Structure formats: C-alpha cells, structure tokens
Amino acid sequence: MSKLHLVFGGRVKDPRTLDFDMKTVEVVGIYDSYSAAEDAWRAAAQRTVDDAEMKFVVVHLHRLLEPDMEGSVTGIARPKAPAG
C-alpha cells in the first residue's frame, strides 16, 4: 500500500486548535510521499502566512487506513518549520 498523505486547511476558530470552520476547508491534495505532502503544505501555508486564523495540516492517511502497518495512529501533524 502507498503511504498516502492528505493536505488540507482552512480557517480555525482559535489558532491554538484544529477546530476548523467547515465552510472554509480547502483540500490541497493527496500525495504518495511525505516529502511531496510537506512541499504542498509549505506552499499552502506560505500563501496565508499573514492570516493567523488560517492553518494547513498533513494527515497520514496510510496510518488511518492500516494502523498496524505503522504501529500506532497519530492522525494529523503539522510539519515542523526548518531551523534558521
């Protein structure tokens, strides 16, 4: 099975949470590698960098579809910004 990753985002009610306003959710795409998903996440996040209420995330679909394959389900993750 491919390691699929979903990138999506939208406006959140509180920037410290993942409580999305469903009217604003935007699906960026589904990618077959974390690297490609991270690139898409970075591009989407950069477009909205000045809006603190917009947030984009990477969902590890492969972990949700086959949790035993990875050992545990972690769900949604935001890639860490590179140092410097």
Image (spheres, helix red, strand yellow):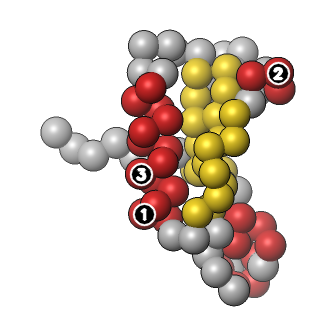
Residue at (58% x, 63% y) in the render: 31
**Residue occupying the far left of the picture:** 84
| Numbered circle sitting on residue 23 | 2
Query: What element does badge 1 sit on?
Result: helix
Residue at (76% x, 76% y) in the render: 67
Badge 2 amino acid: Lys
Measured from the top left, where is residue 11 in percent x and y? 67, 20
Query: What element does badge 2 sit on?
Result: helix
Q: Residues within 10 Å of mark 1 (few under 14, many from 20)?
A: few
Task: Assess whether mark 3 and mark 1 are in contact (beta carbons under 8 angstroms).
Answer: yes
Residue that mark 1 sits on: 35
What distance separates the C-alpha of mark 3 from that of mark 2? 25 Å
Task: Assess whether mark 1 and mark 2 are in contact (beta carbons under 8 angstroms).
Answer: no
Label 3 or label 2, whichever comes before in sequence order: 2
Badge 1 amino acid: Ser
- Foreground residue, 51 or 40? 40
Measured from the top left, where is residue 56 in percent x and y? 58, 36
Q: Quadrant of the N terminus?
A: bottom right
Badge 3 amino acid: Asp
Residue 35 can be seen in this image: yes
Measured from the top left, where is residue 30 in percent x and y? 65, 58
